Amino acid sequence: MENNSEQLQKKSSVVVNAQYIKDLSFENPKSPMSLMLEEQPHMNVSLDILVTPLEPLIFEVVLSIEVRSSAKGEDLFIIDLHYGGVFTLEAENDAEKELTLLVYCPSILFPYARRIISDISRDGGFPPLMISPIDFMGLYSQKKANEAAPNKEEESKVIN
């Protein structure tokens, strides 16, 4: 049985034109004291995907990842990375194009962004932060379900 990624590759044509760091920030506001902390820090990772059409078949996809490490209510370090890619995409329909841009393209970019975050946290004096793999298909499905939920409520209000 084929997975969704393999099905996308057969139906659409995707070319990676470029990959790059669009913006990168590392803050270590409590150094050097934060480096001596013995307690296990709390990690909060947030992710966003931004797609910008550049030309009819060319799109910029940017993964925005923010990592906040804190202990005792204070930030130890903050990493803010915007990692982008430019993709040429030929898709059979809009649904396939959306799926490719929000699932397949971020899946290509994520390992590189993950390595950058690991290197930056290590170079900042902390243990390398290895972000767990992200299920972009699951996030996409959740987004679609959330978009459909308000519509169902409106329909039920009209029917009642």
Image (cartoon, rainbow, N blue to C red):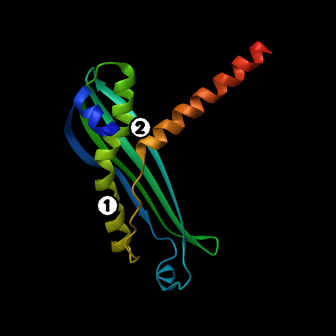
Quarter holding residue 13: top left
Residue at image coords 66%, 23%:
152
Residue wearing tag 1: 116
Quarter holding residue 119: bottom left
Determine whether the residue tagged by mark 1 lies in a helix, strand or loop.
helix
Determine whether the residue tagged by mark 2 lies in a helix, strand or loop.
strand
Q: Is residue 12 visible?
A: no
Q: Hey, what amino acid is under mark 2?
A: Leu
Residue at image coords 34%, 18%:
93
Q: Position of residue 132 (x, y in %)?
A: 41, 60
- Return the mark for residue 50: 2
Q: Position of residue 21 (x, y in %)?
A: 29, 50
Q: Is residue 47 visible?
A: yes
Apparent side of residue 21 relative to residue 124 in the rendered image (left or right): left
Residue at image coords 39%, 36%:
102
Q: CA distance from mark 2 to mark 1?
A: 19 Å
Upstream in sequence: badge 2 or badge 1: 2
